[in-house]
Image (cartoon, rainbow, N blue to C red):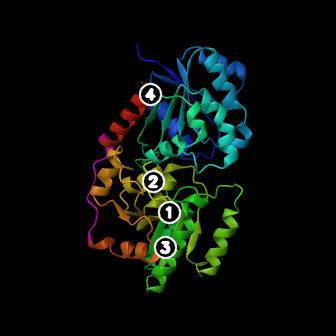
Amino acid sequence: MSKRYLILLSDASQTCGVEEFARQLALRLPGRSGTCVLGDGAARFSERLRDFDGIVLNFPIVAWKKKLVSPLLVAAATRLKRKEVVVVLHEWKALDWKRRVVLAPVIALATRIIFSAPEIAEEFDRSKLSMAAAADRRLIPIPPNLLAPPELRASSVSEALREQRRQGRLILGQFGSIYPKKQSTAVLQVAERLIARGQDVFVVFVGSFIKGTDDVEREFFRLVQTLGLAEHVLVTGYIDDDRELFAIFEPVDVFCYVFSEGLTSRRASVLAAALFGKPVVVNAPVRKDALQHHALYRKLIDAGAIRLVPTDADADTVADAIENLTAVPPERVEFASAIDEVWRTVGKTICP
């Protein structure tokens, strides 16, 4: 008989990719999963756990400072009942050291550890915590956390972008939260290089700034001013309606990412843009096997929907790739069955 797992979620209204993954996982395992809000009370958790063989915790969680103790309490309570604790690590070395300290005892209690990418597994294996952690460690492909709904809904933002396009501007986009490791400011530098070449460019960042120890937002807009892009940049903030979100995607000509570590398979924002049918220019992975386990990513690259530039590509190299996009348009990709297959792999790995 198949085991059943209780998936811990946050109560956040503004979700990140990790939270979306957790919620989608619960939906993709009908009959084999249930959900419980982290920090919803010991009595409520104990009652829900009674009908399950274990729990699944995804890290890093939203609003982690408000949940310092909750993950440890639920993990300890689950182990005391001799049930499984499955931890899915979507990040490790990139986390602030204080986050890793908080997560360490929870991970030490895990009976199975799942990694979102081979880079994360390697980072964890090199850590001291690795020696005290479970030997059962596995790798999963991260599916897209968003797909376009059947109908889109225009908003003031999507209409503003359409107007920019009517004026002949190239619309350059980036989707997802804005934080240092994502190097969103590199896209500003690409835009500046394109404008210097005579391209009329407008850049939309579809997402919001992550608040942390870094003053991300102030530094971002300081660079906007320095590069003379004040009239060429829009940051939408968090969009909670998928119909409005993908209506914003529609006028975008090309999405662009320049990650500090290169592309990794857990970048669901890249998948969302590419699966919507928009070309994505992104710097290549550092590891040759980074996408080997992710058939959907490989399919999109082979079709030209995702165009790779060198990992250490500078702004001019990325600008070249954007200008060359029209020469070889991407092939249409039938992705529904590929996405289903990715989720089947995820389900079998996390909840065997």
> Is there CB contact under 8 Å for labels 1 and 4?
no
Label 3 – label 2 distance at C-alpha = 18 Å
Look at 53% across and 43% down and name the residue there: 126
Label 2 – label 4 distance at C-alpha = 27 Å
Which numbered disc flags the more N-terminal residue, 2 or 4? Answer: 4
Quadrant where the image shows the N terminus: top left
Q: Amino acid at mark 2?
A: Leu
Look at 43% across and 85% down and name the residue there: 197
Nearer the observer, 90 or 110:
110
Whole-percent x, y for residue 93 in the image: 58, 49
Which numbered disc flags the more N-terminal residue, 2 or 1? Answer: 2
**Mark 4 burial class by Cα count in 10 Å: few <14, some 14-19, many 20+:** some
Q: Secondary structure at mark 1?
A: strand
Whole-percent x, y for residue 263 in the image: 44, 57
Q: Which residue is mark 2?
A: 152
Nearer the observer, 134 or 235:
134
Q: Secondary structure at mark 4?
A: loop
Q: Which residue is mark 1?
A: 174
Q: Which residue is mark 4?
A: 29
Q: Is residue 160 visible?
A: no
Label 4 – label 3 distance at C-alpha = 42 Å
Q: Secondary structure at mark 3?
A: helix
> Is there CB contact under 8 Å for labels 2 and 4?
no
Q: Amino acid at mark 1?
A: Gln
